[in-house]
Image: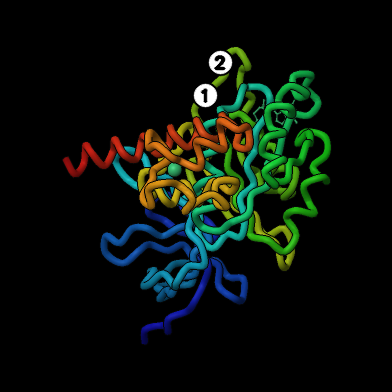
Amino acid sequence: MAEERRVGRVVAAHGSRFEVELADGRRLSCVTRGKKTGVACGDRVEITPTSAEGGVIERVLPRASLLYRSDPQRQKIIAANVTQGVLVVAAVPSFHEEIINRVLVALEAQQLKCVIVLNKADLPETAAAEERLALYRELGYPLVRLSAKTDVSPLRPYLAREVSVLVGQSGMGKSTLVNALVPGARAATREISTALDSGRHTTTHATLYHLDAESDLIDSPGLQEFGLHHLRPEDVAAAMREFRPLLGHCRFHNCLHRVEPGCAIREAVEAGRISPRRFAAYQAIVGEIVDWRARRYG
Ligand code: GDP
Ligand code: ZN
């Protein structure tokens, strides 16, 4: 007799295999039915158990949020049903400010909160990095300075009663942070040579950890780039939180805030009320979307 369908949660996604946790805590290794793709860590799914250890994912239940990025070929789901992003940066290797803005836009587009963690606070280069990050703190994103190697307690209050997804470039100390927050997580910690100042990520899949009964943490693979061409330019403008009060005040109702005359955003930049760094980030993201659409749709 076939087993009845059950509802579970995807706690690990490795390519086409998914670990699904049932309400009773049992975990089944599942595949999707047919060629169905697009299942993400954090998804609530309906499955049919096929054995004591395995099952088939029949359906993904509606998502409260979905964080994803695009690369030229496809969209990559990072995690589903999270309530916030935790963006990990460090002074060494140097972080790309563009990644910060892109992650913030992706999170804001899903109405998700973001905490920025400045890791490796023990390094002397941290002070300068913190200065660069002051811009984001002024925009209202909490900035938590810590050293994952010695003490992660400054971050804990931010993780309470949230489903957080950790994102960051490789080498920022995400694995070290996970190991410290979740005893036994065994996220592969990799000693990278600082001389390389880059490297390949070792985490190839997303994993959900329970911090306590009400708080979860999803670790996602390290990022090198973060494409956003799945968004519309107006989504990007609305995702820049300091642009929001000015939207609708440009001369043209469909202003993209690029070269149009009478642009309220550009005027705010010239008047010093919006940071030129944020305006440049906006231009880069929207420029990429416009170019991508031109190539795709002619
Ligand atoms: P991931 O690629 O983001 O997962 O980064 P890892 O956790 O593998 O860390 C990358 C490198 O940064 C390793 O050499 C870690 O030992 C080092 N690292 C991580 N956290 C800290 C920290 O708080 N202070 C210092 N100085 N180094 C750290
Ligand atoms: Zn405008």
Q: Where does residue 141 sit, x and y in percent of width and height?
A: 68, 46
Q: From where the camera sits, is residue 63 visible?
A: yes
Q: Is 66 drawn above or below residue 236 in the view shown?
A: below
Q: Residue furthest top?
A: 195
Q: Are marks 2 and 1 in contact (CB under 8 Å)?
A: yes
- For the C terminus, the image quarter is top left
Cβ of disc 1 within 8 Å of ligand 1?
Answer: yes
Amino acid type assigned to the residue bearing label 2 in the image:
Leu
* Residue hosting label 1: 199
Give the residue at x 72% y 64%: 161
Cβ of disc 2 within 8 Å of ligand 1?
Answer: no
- The kind of secondary structure element at disc 2 is loop
- For the N terminus, the image quarter is bottom left
Q: Is residue 8 left or right of residue 256?
A: right
Q: Where does residue 168 sit, x and y in percent of width and height?
A: 58, 38
* Residue hosting label 2: 196
Q: Residue furthest left?
A: 298
Give the residue at x 36% y 50%: 254
Amino acid type assigned to the residue bearing label 1 in the image:
Gly
Between the residue at mark 2 and the residue at mark 1, the CA separation in whole angstroms equals 7 Å
**Quadrant in which residue 57 is drawn:** bottom left
Q: Is 132 drawn above or below residue 286 in the view shown?
A: above
Q: Where does residue 89 sit, x and y in percent of width and height?
A: 65, 33
Give the residue at x 59% y 76%: 23
Q: Is residue 123 left or right of residue 246?
A: right
Would you call the spot at circle 1 few (<14 residues within 10 Å), some (14-19), or many (20 or more)? Answer: some
- The kind of secondary structure element at disc 1 is loop
Give the residue at x 60% y 51%: 165
* Ligand 1 located in image quadrant: top right
Q: Is residue 27 left or right of residue 177?
A: left
For the residue pair 114 and 74, the one nearer the viewer reads as 114
For the residue pair 254 and 279, the one nearer the viewer reads as 254
